[in-house]
Amino acid sequence: MLPAPFEYHRPGSLYEALQLLSSLGEAKVLAGGQSLIPLLKFRFAAPAHLVDVNWVPGLDGIAEDGGALRIGALVRHNQVAASDLVSTRFPVLAAAAPQIADPIVRNLGTVCGSLAHADPAGDWGAVMLATGATVVARSVRGERHIPIGDFFQDIFTTALEPDELVTEVRVPAPAGRTGGTYLKLERKVGDFATAAVAAQVTLAPGGTCERAGIGLTNVGPTPIQAKRAEAYLVGKRLEDGVIKEAARLAAEESQPVSDLRGPAEYKRDLVRVLAARALRKALARAGGGR
Ligand SMILES: Cc1cc2nc3c(=O)[nH]c(=O)nc-3n(C[C@H](O)[C@H](O)[C@H](O)COP(=O)(O)OP(=O)(O)OC[C@H]3O[C@@H](n4cnc5c(N)ncnc54)[C@H](O)[C@@H]3O)c2cc1C
């Protein structure tokens, strides 16, 4: 199908982009277009204006700065997958990036676009929940820092105002003995997850768990932070019985529905299995293993 008519805008600066978003009313940001263009073609979305931010300078950086990895609005999934900085310092992101879609989508789709789109099947949501990221949003009114735990509000719905542009997402640099990973089951390569789990743990000097982050993909209306499982782990030695109980809690916190990818009960049990494996891997990496 063809999209409904829209007016196309190509701002050459952040200032211009924010002015356009503020003044146009019914406008949508166009980043990688990998989610928005299909929506336009199916006429699930019919905005009067598209603001293409691909020519805005300064939004394509990926760098560690001020204790965080800063991923700019135009950083593509593949840039994360290819980043040496990410592969050496940010294991959850390094594990997730190559599992997103296929090479063509990864070449165009952006991390920030994926978060703004808020598809519960999107992989970055769970990763950002596990790592405790912050979304940075700009509008003509100024800049807001939105903790990722407050960002996803409902299916395809975020805390962003219609005129706000996500300029970057900040992922805290892992402290001391930290490890993590992202495990995803998909029906075939390139598919969205049947279910997936992001896990990151930080160990205290004595070996107990100081911080745990667990994010779940495609088992609820939003990416889910398994808060009870996280709280259960803190202060404990991550022995296998503890990991199994945390994985059971994470499965309880998931809210899957039955669909083409399988029955809800299957997906809930998949969360349990993936969470236990992800936590074991995170623990091994926190202890210095691969
Ligand atoms: C065949 C296929 C398979 C896919 N498989 C996966 C998968 O396995 N895992 C996965 O996670 N994703 C998958 N995707 C989605 C893909 O990752 C998209 O790249 C991503 O969801 C959206 O990023 P984008 O840059 O393309 O955003 P766009 O499509 O340009 O925009 C998406 C939405 O976000 C808004 N938006 C974009 N950027 C910003 C911003 N900076 N500030 C404010 N709003 C913004 C837009 O207005 C729009 O509403 C798949 C897509 C396709 C086509």
Image (tube, rainbow, N blue to C red):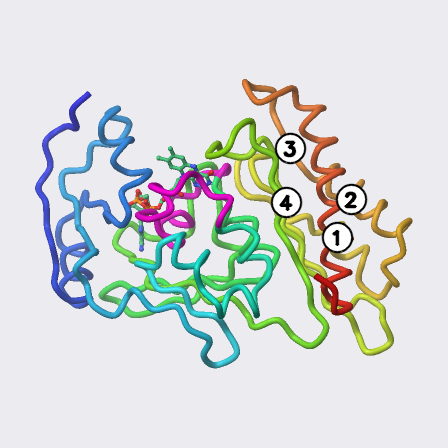
For the residues labelled 3 and 1, say whether their Cβ atoms are less than 8 Å apart.
Answer: no
Mark 1 or mark 4: whose residue is earlier in sequence = 4
Secondary structure found at label 2: helix
Q: Amino acid at mark 1?
A: Leu
Secondary structure found at label 3: loop
Instruction: Give coordinates of residue 4: x percent, y percent.
Output: 14, 28
On the image, which quarter does residue 20 sit in?
Answer: bottom left
Query: In which quadrant is the C terminus drawn?
Result: bottom right
Q: CA distance from mark 3 to mark 2?
A: 14 Å
Q: Of the numbered discs in the image, which one, if any, rests on residue 183? A: 4
Mark 4 or mark 2: whose residue is earlier in sequence = 4
User: Which residue position holds label 1?
Assistant: 279
Q: CA distance from mark 2 to mark 1?
A: 8 Å
Q: CA distance from mark 3 to mark 1?
A: 20 Å
Instruction: Give coordinates of residue 69: x percent, y percent.
Output: 48, 70
Is residue 67 rendered magenta in the image? no
User: Which residue position holds label 3?
Assistant: 255
Q: Where does the magenta region start and end?
A: 98-121
Look at the numbered disc 1 and say if its residue's Cβ is closer than 8 Å to ligand 1. no
Mark 2 or mark 1: whose residue is earlier in sequence = 2
Query: In which quadrant is the N terminus drawn?
Result: top left
User: Which residue position holds label 2?
Assistant: 247
Q: Bin the neighbour count of mark 1 within 10 Å (Cα to Cα): few under 14, some 14-19, many 20 and up.
A: many
Instruction: Give coordinates of residue 200: x percent, y percent.
Output: 67, 59
Q: Amino acid at mark 3?
A: Gln
